[in-house]
Image (cartoon, helix red, strand yellow):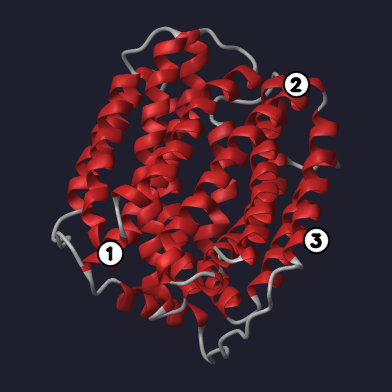
Amino acid sequence: MPKKTYILLIAQFLSAFADNAILFTVIAMVMQASDKASWYIPALQSSFLIAYVVLAPWMGSFADHHPKARVLIIANLIKAAGAVLLLLNIEPLIAYCLVGVGAALYSPAKYGILPELVGHDYLVKANSWIEGSTILAILLGMVVGAKVADYSTQWALIGTIVLFLISAWIAGYLPLQQPKKAASGSKILAFGQQMGSFFTTPRSRFAILGGSLFWASAATLRLIIVAWAPAVLMLKSASDIAQLTLYLAIGIIVGSAVVPRLIPLEHLRRARIAAYLMAILIAVLSLTTSIWPARAVLFVIGMMGGIFIVPINAVLQELGQHSIGSGSAVSLQNFFQNLAMLLAVGGYTYAASLQVSPVMTLVAVGGLVFVATFAVALKLPKSQ
């Protein structure tokens, strides 16, 4: 792969590490406060996601019409500003929402720059590296962030601010490609037109809806684990829960590493098999009552998720580059997947407010993922 790809990998690793360190720092802050209701952590996740949905018409366009390296720098600075607000004891729902704004801007630039750095032959491999390094960063960010936050949330926040700033500095070494000319007119109308044109083929529909399915199930599963682990496995601290979800992250890394050999771009339909297995295993997780079986099931769930999401991202970027722009395609994907995540997290928040047990919620999520996979894979051609 081109050397510039490795610069992107380092910048992305640091930014993703800080993203997840700050998440578990906020979770630690909530767990240390005795006056927070059970719905507060799901509400935090929603405050982060809402920027992806509300700002989607502008974020992809901004990424496509400005040098993406500069967009990565700006996004990291916005995320650092959100961490500063948390450090100043501003309401976490507001501060974490600002971190979400930075992340919503970062995502279309991160994935949109890949087709500019590598060609068709390396696109799945580059996505595999990006996903693998991102999940490694998630893994380490969760564990290290939770450990430091259990000791001091202030030092954890300072660390995330420093990492966001270093990531912004490294992104400055990426090449500045000539951006597309900005189109005049309403961004909302343009976004609607892009949505209509991009849904014309089964492959693009599967890429958008399949990615939405993966991230909705991942977001919900992570929140269920926060409630399920203390109730079933008797884990009490943020770092203990982070170490459990570590196995999910390791599985995604392994799945991301093996998928280029299993699912080339021309055989996207194969990805649905991994999604079916992921759904079944989410339901199986509800049957586990001890730590090592839970870790094993989470590992395989993560592996199936990695095999499912990597080719979807690669296809989306390639289709987008040749149609509405890779940044706009990723922003369109972000809109749908974060809308799905908001609905899923909202549904879980409502279920938690009704005192539905996390065990029953796991069974329901597994069943819904299985049915949704069947629905989004309909009419997908065997090869392309």
Which residue is tagged 1? 205
**Where does the image place residue 312, in percent across and percent down from the top left?**
36, 57
Q: Residues within 10 Å of mark 2 (few under 14, many from 20)?
A: some
Q: Quadrant of residue 199?
A: bottom left
**Residue 7 image label:** none
Left or right: 203 with respect to 20? Answer: left
Nearer the observer: mark 3 or 2; the answer is 3
Nearer the observer: mark 3 or 1; the answer is 3
Q: Residues within 10 Å of mark 3 (few under 14, many from 20)?
A: some
**Where does the image place residue 123, in percent across and percent down from the top left?**
44, 64
Check the image and report above or below for 375 versus 190. Answer: above
What distance separates the C-alpha of mark 3 from that of mark 2?
29 Å
SS of the residue at dot 2? helix
Q: Residue at x 44, y 32 (%)?
A: 251
Q: Residues within 10 Å of mark 1 (few under 14, many from 20)?
A: some
Amino acid, disc 1: Arg
Check the image and report above or below for 107 versus 28. Answer: below
Q: Earlier in the sequence, mark 2 or mark 1?
A: 2
Amino acid, disc 3: Trp
**Where does the image place residue 128, in percent across and percent down from the top left?**
46, 51
Which residue is tagged 3? 169
